[in-house]
Amino acid sequence: MIDSHAHLDDEAFDEDRDEVINGLYENGIDFIVNIGCDLKSSEKCFELSEIYENIYATVGVHPHDAKTYDDDLEKRLIELAGGKKIVAIGEIGLDYFYDNSPRNVQKEIFKRQLALAGKLKKNVVIHSREASQDTFDILKDAHEKYDFTAVIHCYSQSVEMLKEYLKMGDYISLGGAVTFKNSKNPKEVAKVVPLERLLLETDCPYMTPVPFRGKRNEPKYVNLVAEYIAKLRDMTKEDLVKITDSNTKRFYNIS
Ligand code: NI
């Protein structure tokens, strides 16, 4: 199966990155999409996608690092986005939980990267935390201006909000949080989201699903996310994964 959102460039994999990547297939993972967060990780994403057959990647600047975004950085992103296995712009968005960049800067850079995605004809990967309404408003406005589809990764917003995203043609992605005892929204959402709009992810090394919570997350654990959601929906894991894998390929335009 596919892990649609991983961060194997993260320093948590510095000791054994090669081993983890080369072991993907025997752990049941056909390929992963490695997601960029800042310029350095976008460079690394590009590099990994060039070296390894089973890695596709995205480039973009996370809201945490919005304050680092300038014209030179954008120029470099455009170059990287030209890579033949760079399949989207992301992760971009808003994070009002950490507020690592001022909110007005986060909003400005989010809009700017949506415009960039429109120009480059790429889909976008969205990070949104404690910023539900602003994320939605900015995305809605961008949908009116540019032609793209978004995936709201690690979706933790309400079912009501989900309906609004679905109306705009967007996707959501669920990961380890769905297995956490105290996570209400992801479980509710997992039960009702139309299957053709759902992607599965790990967000590794973060968000490790139960029963490995607290340990380093890895792409192979996307299997546990699939198992959990399949049970919630009263279907087999195989049937679920068949649909979500084909969604991932469609969303990222991977054949
Ligand atoms: Ni992520």
Image (spheres, helix red, strand yellow):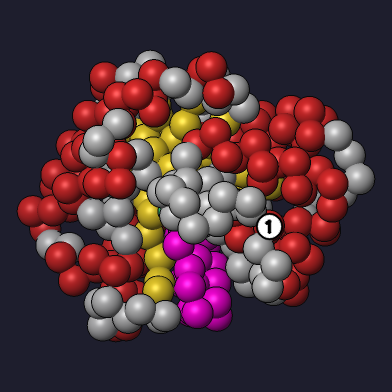
In percent of width and height, residue 24 lies at: 48, 23
User: Visible in this render: residue 167?
Assistant: no
Secondary structure of residue under mark 1:
helix
Dot 1 alpha-carbon crowd within 10 angstroms: few under 14, some 14 to 19, many 20 or more? many
User: Visible in this render: residue 218?
Assistant: yes
Q: Give the range drawn in magenta.
A: 124-145
From the image, tell me which residue sits under label 1. Answer: 179
Quadrant in the rendering for residue 180? bottom right
Side of 210 where 72 appears, left or right: left
Q: Residue at (62%, 43%) from the top-left corner?
A: 200
Magenta span dominant secondary structure: helix
Q: Tally the marks.
A: 1
Depth check: 2 or 90 in front? Answer: 2
Q: Residue at (23%, 66%) from the top-left corner?
A: 65
Q: Residue at (30%, 46%) from the top-left corner?
A: 12
* Residue 91, placed above or below residue 132: above
The three-letter code of the residue at mark 1 reads Thr
